[in-house]
Image (spheres, grey):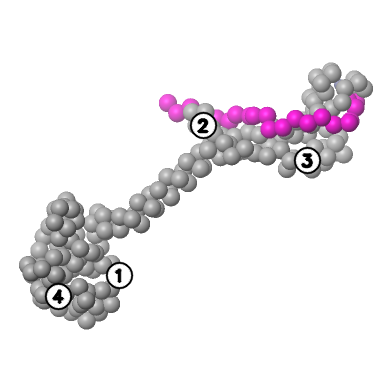
Amino acid sequence: MIIFGTRTKLLSAVGTQHTCSHCNTGKLNLVYTGSYFHIFWIPIFPLGKKGMTQCPHCKQTLTERELGPQSRSYVNSQKSSAKTPLTHFSGLIIIGVLIFSIFLINAFDKTGGYIRNPKIGDVYQVKGNAENQFVLWKVTAVEGDTVVFATHSQYNLVQADINEQTVFGKLDEKFTDSRLKMAKRNIKSMTQNDKNLVAIFRK
Ligand SMILES: [Zn+2]
């Protein structure tokens, strides 16, 4: 069961020099309240402010609607002085932080994201048999958890040969039809241990 609803909190109460028209004795207080929508009592976002006058003597409370036009416009004009506390935005702030975290995780784990969601045309730079030599694999199909690659005909590419321009440029035509199939979890393990998967290029 999700418990949600609205709650109202006092924002500010200040004294004025206006005498209460009801008892002609008390000096009216100017009171503002702020409401917010909550889920399990955690404020999610504010719903607005309400102003009213309160007489400390006879206790009469008049909301904006019940006030005369002049008093009402005065109460309204002072509304901005009653600030909505940041806590009334807690839910929005939490959601914002979560979205930002996901964004950061994705930014820092680009390779992980590419492995989880492979796209046809992605080019993988994989360590070759010899030291400092690389081979390229190009994603040609994705079948569930299995990724199908075409491998590059050159097995002795060096780091200087491989960059975004060459991978999608002059090297692009030399992928063979030979089909290599690999499960995503095995591709993932290639980024660990021996770090055989060096980089993934995406257009
Ligand atoms: Zn009064």
State which mark lies toward you, 4 or 1: 4
Q: Sequence-wise, which precedes: disc 3 or disc 2?
A: 2
Q: Amino acid at mark 4?
A: Leu
Marks 1 and 3: in contact by CB < 8 Å? Answer: no
- Please state which of residues 16 and 40 is positioned toward the viewer in this rendering: 16
Q: Amino acid at mark 3?
A: Gln
In the picture, the quarter occupied by the C terminus is bottom left
Q: Percent position (x, y) of residue 105?
A: 35, 51
Going by the image, does 203 lie left or right of 16? left
Q: Is residue 115 above or below residue 128?
A: above
**What secondary structure is marked by label 1?**
loop
Report if residue 187 is visible in the image. Answer: no
Magenta-drawn stretch contains 2: yes
* Residue assigned mark 4: 157
Identify the residue at the far right of this view. 24
Give the Cα distance between marks 1 and 2: 43 Å
State which mark lies toward you, 2 or 4: 4
**Mark 2, other Cα within 10 Å: few <14 / some 14–19 / many ≥20:** some
In the picture, the quarter occupied by the N terminus is top left
* Residue assigned mark 1: 203
Q: Which residues are magenta?
A: 1-21
Identify the residue at the far bottom of this view. 170
Give the Cα distance between marks 3 and 2: 28 Å
* Residue assigned mark 2: 42
**What secondary structure is marked by label 3?**
loop
Q: Is residue 121 above or below residue 46?
A: below
